[in-house]
Amino acid sequence: STNPLESYMPHMSLLYGDLPDDEKEKAKVKAQAKFDDLIRNTEFQVSSLCLYSTDTEDNSLTSWHKVAECDLKAC
């Protein structure tokens, strides 16, 4: 069996929702066409990180809650 901690890939999601596959594909194509260069060539400073507890079955995201926040400027 696979250890879920070993298979987890940190990521940043740009779209949440219970969408049909064709809608997801449309959003992906649109994002790649309009934002690929912008995202690749954008720099920004991260001042804090937040950890959220999430219920993957909650498509409304209302059950999500912040568990911790780390101020990176204090490190």
Image (spheres, helix red, strand yellow):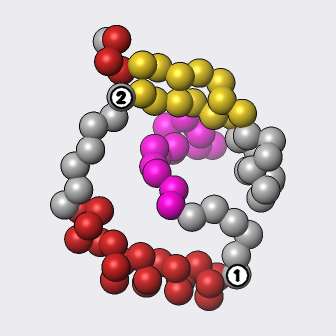
State yes or no: residue 48 in magenta: no
N-term-proximal mark, 1 vs 2: 1
* Label 1: few (<14), some (14–19) or many (≥20) C-alpha neighbours in 10 Å: few
- Is 74 on the left-hand or right-hand side of 61? left
Seen from the viewer's position, the closer of residues 4 and 14 is 14
Q: Quadrant of the C terminus?
A: top left
Q: Residue at x 63, y 34 (%)?
A: 52
- Is 48 on the left-hand or right-hand side of 33? right
Farthest residue to the top: give it: 74
Q: Residue at x 52, y 79 (%)?
A: 27
x and y percentages locating residue 67 in the rendered image: 65, 24
x and y percentages locating residue 54 in the rendered image: 71, 41
Camera-side mark, 1 or 2: 2
Amino acid type, mark 2 = Ser
State yes or no: residue 12 in magenta: yes
- Is 40 on the left-hand or right-hand side of 70? left
The numbered disc on residue 6 is: none
Amino acid type, mark 1 = Pro
For mark 2, what is the residue?
47
User: Label 2's element?
Assistant: loop
Which region shows up in magenta? 1-14
Total marks placed: 2
The numbered disc on residue 20 is: 1
x and y percentages locating residue 18 in the rendered image: 73, 69
Seen from the viewer's position, the closer of residues 6 and 44 is 44
Q: Residue at x 66, y 29 (%)?
A: 66
Quarter of the image where one finds residue 19: bottom right
Q: Where 75 sits versus 27, above or below? A: above
Cα distance between the residues tagged 1 and 2: 35 Å
Q: Where 70 sits versus 16, above or below? A: above
